[in-house]
């Protein structure tokens, strides 16, 4: 019995897919399938029930899974302890889907304290292969089932417009904005999803006049009167050319989490995660 067989088995049991396991380990699907078949032959029983498109852990597989996961967990912990003691040179891979400017600032500050640490950062909402990342920064979603998480930020959201917009200073309902154009930070962005959800409750779909994922350009577009936008509260001075609208039924918050895999929580990855956890975010 080989260690890699157990890793393939454990990952396939969690994902119910040989394909996802192959993608994670960067090998052909046939390699994963053949490895698990050899494991089944060695043990003397089937571990998965197979269909045309999926695999399902059977009763035999369930008996083996707890033991295999326990063994792999203890092994990873031992490796992590040794890596921490002797210097971990892994590149920290981050998928950042929220608070890009602040997380970039966190990376800069951490790098000052740990100059030998290398980072790979990706700002992308279209990515589906999450397992290649050590840390993911995102709002609450159900697409990271095998990740641990902790809260990084929680802040109120505002609808804002150009300071000279006639809507400024008025008491409004969200439905009062149904005929107004909106500016979006990206049709797959978290703030866009929140906006669409709020507008749907008010009975309309927001008309998007401009899509812009650069925050400085976004604020310039708001100030020019191109549309209404969603912004987060911050400790920075407000742009005098932009004002918050008084919309009584827009009561949305923006909560961002740090997601990480427990199996990778050692060495420099652990150090960076602990840094994020302890950083003052008021």
Image: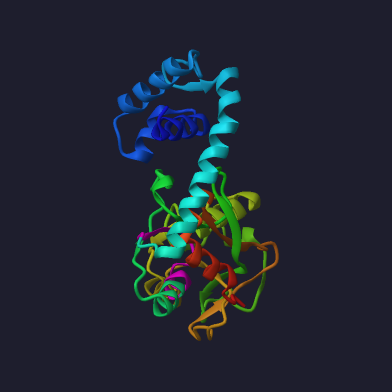
Does any portion of residue 207 appear in the rendered image? no
Picture residue at 50% right of the left edge, 51% below the top? 78
Picture residue at 55% right of the left edge, 52% below the top? 196
- Viewer-proximal residue among 223 and 61: 61
Picture residue at 60% right of the left edge, 49% below the top? 200
Is 9 placed above or below 150 here?
above
Q: How many labels does the image show?
A: 0
- Viewer-proximal residue among 44 and 47: 44
- Viewer-proximal residue among 140 and 22: 22
Give the quadrant of the C terminus. bottom right
Does any portion of residue 107 appear in the rendered image? yes
In x, y percent, where is residue 238? 53, 83
In x, y percent, where is residue 205? 53, 50
Is residue 104 highlighted in magenta?
Answer: yes
**How is this picture coloured?**
rainbow
In magenta, the rendered stretch is 90-105
In x, y percent, where is residue 211? 39, 60
Q: Which quadrant of the figure has residue 114? A: bottom left
Q: In this view, does 185 lie to the left or right of 195?
A: left
Give the quadrant of the N terminus. top left
Is 251 placed above or below 105 here?
above
Is residue 177 highlighted in magenta?
Answer: no
């Amino acid at each position: 019995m080989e260690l890699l067989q157990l890793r393939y088995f454990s990952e396939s049991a969690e994902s119910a897919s040989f394909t996802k396991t192959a993608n994670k380990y960067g090998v052909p699907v046939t390699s994963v399938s053949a490895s698990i078949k050899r494991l089944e032959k060695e043990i003397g029983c089937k571990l998965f029930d197979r269909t045309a498109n999926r695999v399902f852990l059977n009763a035999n597989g369930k008996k083996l899974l707890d033991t295999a996961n326990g063994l792999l967990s203890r092994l990873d912990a031992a490796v992590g302890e040794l890596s921490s003691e002797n210097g971990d040179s892994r590149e920290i891979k981050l998928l950042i889907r929220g608070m890009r400017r602040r997380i970039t600032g966190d990376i800069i500050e951490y790098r000052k304290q740990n100059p030998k640490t290398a980072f790979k950062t990706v700002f992308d909402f279209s990515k589906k292969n999450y397992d290649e990342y050590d840390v993911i920064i995102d709002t609450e979603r159900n697409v990271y089932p095998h990740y641990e998480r902790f809260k990084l930020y929680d802040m109120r959201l505002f609808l804002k417009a150009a300071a000279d917009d006639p809507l400024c200073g008025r008491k409004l309902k969200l439905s009062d904005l149904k005929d107004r154009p909106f500016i979006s930070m990206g049709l797959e962005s978290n703030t866009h999803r929140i906006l669409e959800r709020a507008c749907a409750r008010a009975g309309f779909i927001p008309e998007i006049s401009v899509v812009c994922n650069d925050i400085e350009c976004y604020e310039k577009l708001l100030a020019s009167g191109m549309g209404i936008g969603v912004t987060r509260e911050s400790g920075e001075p407000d742009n005098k050319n932009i004002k918050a609208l008084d919309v009584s039924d827009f009561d949305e918050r923006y909560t961002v989490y740090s997601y990480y895999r427990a199996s990778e929580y050692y060495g420099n990855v652990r150090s960076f995660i602990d840094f994020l956890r302890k950083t003052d975010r008021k």
